[in-house]
Image (spheres, rainbow, N blue to C red):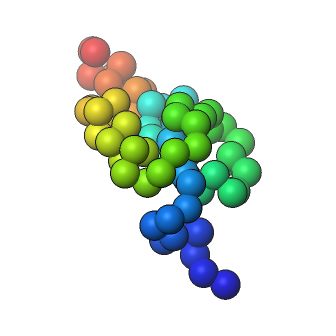
Amino acid sequence: MSNPFDDESASFLVLTNPEGQHSLWPASIDVPEGWEVALPASDRPACRAYIEAHWTDLRPRSLIAAMGG
């Protein structure tokens, strides 16, 4: 069985968690608890572009808040 995370031709989602972190996630796998779909099923390049455009501060939200914004 191949790894669905490595399938370049698969459809992917972009997920986010409450800390604002993003994840590239295979559309064929259920979304894990605590994560929400930020970008519906798309190809890998579109998902990567979305993540690069929207996740510009890699610090978790709690750390940003602790540092005063």
Please determine whether, in this image, residue 44 is positioned above or below residue 56.
Answer: below
Please determine whether, in this image, residue 45 is positioned above or below residue 6.
Answer: above
The residue depicted at 67 percent of the width and 84 percent of the height is 1
Q: Position of residue 34 (x, y in %)?
A: 66, 37
Q: Which of 44 and 25 is in front in this view?
A: 44
- Specify the farthest residue to the bottom: 1
Quadrant position of residue 8: bottom left
Q: Position of residue 68 (x, y in %)?
A: 27, 15
The residue depicted at 58 percent of the width and 43 percent of the height is 41
The residue depicted at 32 percent of the width and 42 percent of the height is 49
- Specify the farthest residue to the top: 68
Q: Position of residue 2 (x, y in %)?
A: 60, 81
Q: How many marks?
A: 0
Residue 39 in sight here: yes
Left or right placement of residue 28 versus residue 10 in this view: right
Q: Which of 68 and 26 is in front in this view?
A: 26
Left or right placement of residue 28 versus residue 46 in this view: right
Q: Where is residue 14 in the image (x, y as percent from the top left)?
A: 51, 42
Residue 58 in sight here: no
The residue depicted at 59 percent of the width and 69 percent of the height is 4
Q: In which quarter of the image is the C terminus?
A: top left
Q: Which of 29 and 43 is in front in this view?
A: 43
Quadrant position of residue 65: top left
